[in-house]
Amino acid sequence: MNIKPIRNDEDLQWAFQQLELVFQARENTPEADEMEIWVTLIEAYENKHYAIAPPDPIDAIRFRMEQQALTPRDLEPYIGSCGRVSEVLNRKRSLSLKMIKRLHDGLHIPYDSLLAGVG
């Protein structure tokens, strides 16, 4: 087993080739251990260099609205009056922590999406 850190994309390609050699390894074998190490190294490199940022909070809300065929009126229990919903959806008002919690609890929008760009 010749494992080394992944420092660049060339190293990443080499790591994928090594992973391919042991990918079908049976459990509880040295090859399975090697496969687990390669997967961990590759994930760490990709998370650091190719991280996918959470969506914009308003985009996340609009996506959930589309998924569940919701209208702006359906958001009133989570955001407030129709005017406030309009301001939020048009990016004229920021989400408050209370709104974020209600949207998360009621519509199951992940916190990391609703808090993206905050702070």
Image: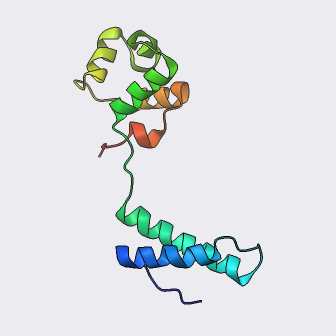
Task: Report the side of 28 relative to 100 (left or right).
Answer: right
Percent across and percent down for residue 99 are: 41, 26
Q: Residue at x 76, y 73 (%)?
A: 26
- Of all residues shown, which one is farthest toward the left? 92
Percent across and percent down for residue 91 are: 24, 26
> Which of the two residues, 6 or 101, is positioned nearer the viewer here?
6
Percent across and percent down for residue 8 are: 35, 76
The image shows residue 79, relative to residue 47, as above or below, that is above
The image shows residue 98, relative to residue 49, as above or below, that is above
> Which of the two residues, 107 or 28, is positioned nearer the viewer here?
28
Within the image, what quadrant is residue 116 found in? Answer: top left
Q: Residue at x 68, y 81 (%)?
A: 31
Percent across and percent down for residue 101 are: 47, 31
The scheme the figure's colours follow is rainbow
> Which of the two residues, 100 or 30, is positioned nearer the viewer here?
30
Within the image, what quadrant is residue 49 found in? Answer: bottom left
Q: Quadrant of the N terminus?
A: bottom right
Task: Report the side of 94 relative to 69 (left or right).
Answer: left
Task: Report the side of 87 relative to 47 (left or right).
Answer: left
